[in-house]
Amino acid sequence: MIGMGTSERQRIQIDSQAREWQRKLQRGSLQQDEMEEFGHWMAVPAHAAAYADCEWSTACVEALDQRLDPQWSGWKDEAMQRARNGAPKVEPLANWSDLVFSPTSRSRNREGSGFMKAAFAMAACLAILAFGFSWKRMTTTNVLHYQAGDATREVLLPDGTRLTLDAGTAVDYMKVGETRRLLLPSGRVYLSVSKDPHHARFVVQSGQVETVVLGTRFQVSQTADRTEVVLEEGKVRMQRPGTALFATLAPGERGWWTADASGFQTAAATPSSALAWTRGRLLFEDASLADAIVEVNRYSRHVQIELADPEVGQLKVNGSYLAGDAELVVAAWEATLPVHALHQGDRIKLVHK
């Protein structure tokens, strides 16, 4: 390790921490204070990225182990021996992971450089066998902040609850007394809530609405004047704090509250369709083209779609599309709708044919 740069040393330390946390989670041996420490650790974007890459490399290793390929076994034995000898530089795992997963199967929140980092994650994970270090317990705070960039982000809260934040969504998590509280100012989040052994309530506060749950899977969407909840499993109660207004949802239902409404409204829902975004898909069912464009633009980093004619925005859109590829979506619309696309640099304007 002589001559190793500070950034390289920090990267190996973070990758080592990620591997250690993964081992603890796999064993299920974390106590409450350790879960809180893990939540603080995961709140750092670099830590979350390292943990995701470690999970990815572990998935590749497990899949390849099941194949009983002698070439793979030989490579793995050599890599482990190098790690024990303090020389963990090995052949990139990308050469092997391509045999298990297609390049498009990874989460769309990985850019090209991020994928190559994941390809070398196995070497980094092996390096922890040869590189020892110590690190201090992180200073605790009352509020944990998580934010997604231009793609979705997976988050594990200190209580074991798993979140999927939609692109551009930010949340704050805190425990007030015996209540676990998540604040969602705007955006969309999917939750798989962990049941608390002491039956502590989990509350999502979004706009004028609180969604109360003990253990379930559901989605909350918040815009300037509307809160909507789609329930996949369990039971939740939407309520207006300080009033007697509430609505209890069953699996396969959605409920919503709009600004200045006199009560909650509910209707049947198809969770698999509503949650398509968590799988990297955009699913439109009789949606207006204007609304569909908003969703497509949410995930498009380099190209934005615009309407040259507002009337075109009233056209109805149906179908499932890959999030993050605006040009592919526009090509599909040109083939199925009476629209023509004008490409102008980083803008695509849709006009009526």
Image (cartoon, rainbow, N blue to C red):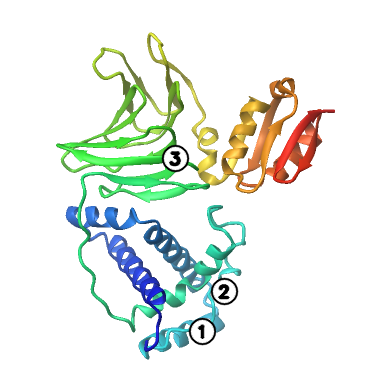
Q: Marks 3/2: CA distance?
A: 34 Å
Secondary structure category for the residue under label 1: helix
Residue lying furthest top: 262
Quarter occupied by the C terminus: top right
Circle 2: is it few (<14), some (14-19), or many (20+) Cα within 10 Å? some
Closer to the chain start, of discs 3 and 1, is 1
Quarter occupied by the N terminus: bottom left
Q: Is residue 5 visible?
A: yes
Viewer-nearest residue: 161 or 70: 161
Residue type indicated by callout 3: Thr
- What's the residue at 42%, 39% (across, down)? 190
Residue type indicated by callout 1: Trp
- What's the residue at 61%, 46% (across, down)? 324
Secondary structure category for the residue under label 3: loop
Secondary structure category for the residue under label 2: helix
User: Which mark, residue 96?
Assistant: 2
In the rendered view, does 26 fall on the left or right side of 311?
left
Relative image position of residue 271 (x, y in whole percent): 49, 33
Closer to the chain start, of discs 2 and 1, is 1
* CB contact under 8 Å: marks 2 and 1: yes
* CB contact under 8 Å: marks 3 and 1: no
- What's the residue at 37%, 76% (across, down)? 6
- Residue picked out by circle 3: 169
- Residue picked out by circle 1: 75
Circle 1: is it few (<14), some (14-19), or many (20+) Cα within 10 Å? some
Relative image position of residue 299 (x, y in whole percent): 58, 43
